[in-house]
């Protein structure tokens, strides 16, 4: 049940991003649910491999390269899913940052109550 709640929270966070950044567009709730699912799978499978492969660069940049990885994955998902559009890499990096902050805030608010 918690997994479904997290999926819905992530979809809601995705729907909030176009109101904060005009360079990120999402068509509707159905697209947000698909994007949340794909982002979850990408972050579970591909992101750990990228973090491991780029560990020296991440250490040299004191962890800031993680933002680049998150932006690239966000941008990659935007290129894979129809109805989800990001205009460029920096917009994707900002969108990924906003997405993580919004989804973390919502899940903290919701799951702290129960």
Image (cartoon, rainbow, N blue to C red):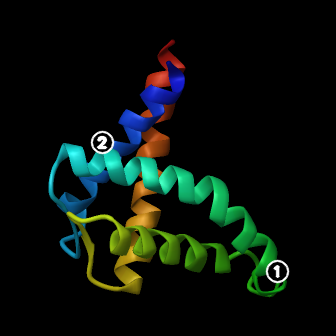
Front residue of 104/11: it is 11
| Residue lying at 18% horizontally and 59% vertically, measured from the top left | 19
Distance from the alpha carbon under mark 1 to that under mark 2: 33 Å
| Residue lying at 45% horizontally and 54% vertically, measured from the top left | 38
Q: Measured along the vertical axis of the image, is residue 110 above or below residue 17?
A: above
Residue denoted by label 1: 59
Q: Quadrant of residue 90?
A: bottom left
Front residue of 109/99: it is 99
Residue extending furthest top?
114
For the residues labelled 1 and 2, say whether their Cβ atoms are less than 8 Å apart: no
| Residue lying at 32% horizontally and 44% vertically, measured from the top left | 33
| Residue 62: % across, % down | 76, 79
| Residue lying at 57% horizontally and 80% vertically, measured from the top left | 68
Q: Measured along the vertical axis of the image, is residue 60 above or below residue 43?
A: below
- Residue 105: in sight, yes or no? yes
Left or right: residue 56 compared with residue 37: right
Mark 1 vs mark 2, foreground winner is 2
| Residue 103: % across, % down | 43, 45
Left or right: residue 66 compared with residue 6: right
Label 1 SS: helix
| Residue 82: % across, % down | 24, 65
Label 2 SS: helix
Front residue of 82/55: it is 82
Residue denoted by label 2: 12
């Amino acid at each position: 049940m918690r997994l479904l709640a997290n999926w819905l929270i992530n979809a809601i966070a995705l729907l909030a991003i176009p109101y904060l950044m005009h360079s990120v567009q999402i068509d509707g709730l159905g697209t947000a649910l698909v994007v949340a699912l794909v982002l979850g799978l990408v972050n579970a499978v591909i992101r750990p491999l990228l973090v491991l492969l780029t560990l020296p660069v991440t250490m040299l940049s004191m962890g800031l390269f993680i933002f680049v990885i998150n932006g690239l994955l966000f941008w990659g998902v935007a290129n894979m899913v129809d109805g989800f559009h990001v205009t460029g890499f920096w917009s994707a990096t900002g969108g990924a940052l906003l997405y993580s902050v919004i989804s973390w805030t919502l899940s903290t608010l919701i799951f702290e109550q129960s």
